[in-house]
Image (spheres, rainbow, N blue to C red):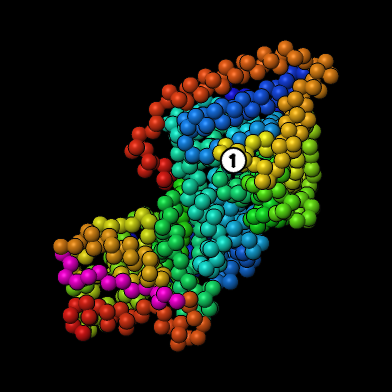
Amino acid sequence: MPETLTRELTFGQAVREALAEEMRRDPRVCIFGEDVAEAGTPFKVLSGLVEEFGTQRVLDTPISEAGFTGIAVGAAMTGLRPIVDIMFGDFITLTMDQMVNQAAKVHYMSGGAWRVPMVMRTTLGATRRSGAQHSQSLHAWFSHVPGLKVVMPSTPYDAKGLLKTAIRDENPVVFFEDKMMYTKLKGPVPTEEYTIPFGVADVKRVGRDITLVATSSMVQVALGAADLLQEAGTSAEVVDPRTMWPLDEKTLIESAKKTSRVIVIDEGYERYGVTAEIAAVIAEGAFYNLDAPVKRMGAMHIPIPFSPPLEDATVPTEKSVFEVARKLCGEA
Amino acid sequence: MTIATDKSQAKSETKAGHWMRMYRQMVSIRLFEEQVNELYTRALMPGLAHLYIGEEAVAVGVCETLRADDYVTSTHRGHGHCLAKGASPDRMFAELLGKEAGYCKGKGGSMHIADPATGNLGANAIVAGSVGIATGAALSAKRLETDRVAVCFFGEGALGQGVLYEVMNVASLWKLPVIYICENNLYTEYTHFTETTAGDIPARAAAFGLQAESVDGQDVRAVFETAGRLVDRARRGSGPSFLVCNTYRYTGHHVGDINREYYRSKEEEKHWKTERDPIKLLADWLVAQSLADADQFSGIRSEIEGQMQKAVEFAMAAPYPNVSEAEEDVYA
């Protein structure tokens, strides 16, 4: 991180700043979505953008996720650089044909003739008491599809730098934001221009005894668990891949080789989730250096329940990560 | 070997020349498709082949109203649209055979021909898959003030897909220069459209405020006149429209669909082929108007036969892509 840090921004402010800067830089960038203009979305992340850029660039759409995502694909092919806002990550189900069969394949199917430089911004994360259809973390779905890039920032700094890269990318990029971080997570963000390349993991904390690979919402959980582990005498390294695809396999494998024990923590469903892919990459790449099987921790394999004590039990916590780590190190 | 020409040329040419060019284009599509049938039945063409024979007046009548830089999107039955918009038969055949020289380097195939040089955003093998793309292209045209229009071709089967209504709603709200061309060839695969389509078709579009019309899709002059009005209207900024072209698919849903008596009679097929053939209808009119004679038609036919034969030979002789090409073009 550069040394010229001048202020702290919330995660939501960092996202907004990235959007505003890129819209100032490139008049082709525009935003479509439900209540993105005057309302600034229910999360208020886009507040102020329509006032600066006008309703021709910040466009309120009907509640038609498939329709406006498809329109974004065509607009991206023909000279605009659209950013679509899918309010809750659960609603990506409605956009699947547009993203999977259209956006992801246009460049390949046309032999490279057409490009789809668009961004889909959406959210993930449970524990907001929103029920089973407003709480899922479905980034694994898009990570499975060649032709898409999938980004999962965990800090305001990463959110801003990665979103600027996403908007400048020539491909369809899906950008998952943890909706619980918008106002709750603050962090240093430089005032100077910067971008963060895709496919470069970030070691959020250096450690010796165990690697905690964590994504998005789970990075703060892993860092909290690392504090608890430190108190118990175990030194944990926290590695954030930041992009699911492209995936920085090298950094993950190197950390695993160094510590010899790994837990992969992600808020998506554990079964067939991104934790499985990352665990497999590490198991193959660091097999002879591992002292324990690679452990995965994700959301329970159930629809997210509404009742607070039930919902809280569905996702990994600092305590549950601490306990699994202790066990993996043979100390529990 | 391009068969379409810019409409601006039409203004200076004679009345006979204007219609004779459309005659040539319809014959080109027919003879192209006859070659496809031949290649397929001789097992020289891999995959699937959906022939446009019988529907030629729709693609030709509509595309003749367009500028070279106007956009089209097409369907799984898309060879006619590609040719009418200006694609070369040699590179099309190469694509159909999976050759490197094809429009998509062989990666797209029959159902995915795309070509930026002729404004072809791509044929789409998802029914209604391109309605968002066409509408997005119209949004770009409006926002970037390029004065272009977008034409979205789809079969009546696409009327069953919800995304069509989502994008027509947006196109109407945003007054986009897009023309939705519904080719009603009566059969949604192997089912008569009346079994799958309730109510009145143009009324569906009219409900969203689109200018909605129907035309005899076997009469290229009527298609040209009606589409021309709708295209001019869109280019003037008067918004989107919807045109049902009533037509008929002479052959099966795909080349292997030979026994069709369970869904339609041979008498019905014979009626359309003898009484309602678009090429014959135009030829008869040209003769009645003393604008052409039978010798001219047979001359054109043998000339185009020769062109198609050469195009097939080119494609047959062209090399397949190198296997290393498989991983290219996934990302721009």
Type of amino acid at the residue the image marks with label 1: Asp
The front one of A73 and B142 is A73
Where does the C terminus of chain B fall, quadrant-wise? Answer: top left
Residue A175 is one of the magenta-drawn residues? no
Where does the N terminus of chain B fall, quadrant-wise? Answer: top right
Which image quadrant for residue A330? bottom left
Q: Residue at x 33, y 65 (%)?
A: A276
Would residue B229 be visible to someone looking at this image?
no
Density class for disc 1 (Cα within 10 Å; few <14, some 14-19, many ≥20) is few
> Farthest residue in the top direction?
B295
Q: Circle 1 sits on which residue?
A: B257
**Subunit of label 1:** B
Q: Residue at x 79, y 43 (%)?
A: B214
Which residues are the magenta region? A289-302
Residue B39 to residue B128: above or below: above
Residue B254: image location, x then y, percent = 58, 40
Residue A294 is one of the magenta-drawn residues? yes
Q: Residue at x 46, y 66 (%)?
A: A138
Residue A15: image location, x then y, percent = 48, 64
Question: Number of numbered discs present?
Answer: 1
Would residue B7 be visible to someone looking at this image?
yes
Residue B215: image location, x then y, percent = 79, 39
Residue B296 to residue A79: above or below: above
Q: Secondary structure at mark 1?
A: loop
In this image, B122 relative to A327: left or right? right
In this image, A82 relative to A302: left or right? right
Residue B218 to residue B177: above or below: above
Residue B229: image location, x then y, percent = 78, 37
Q: Residue at x 59, y 28 (%)?
A: B34
> Farthest residue in the bottom direction?
A309
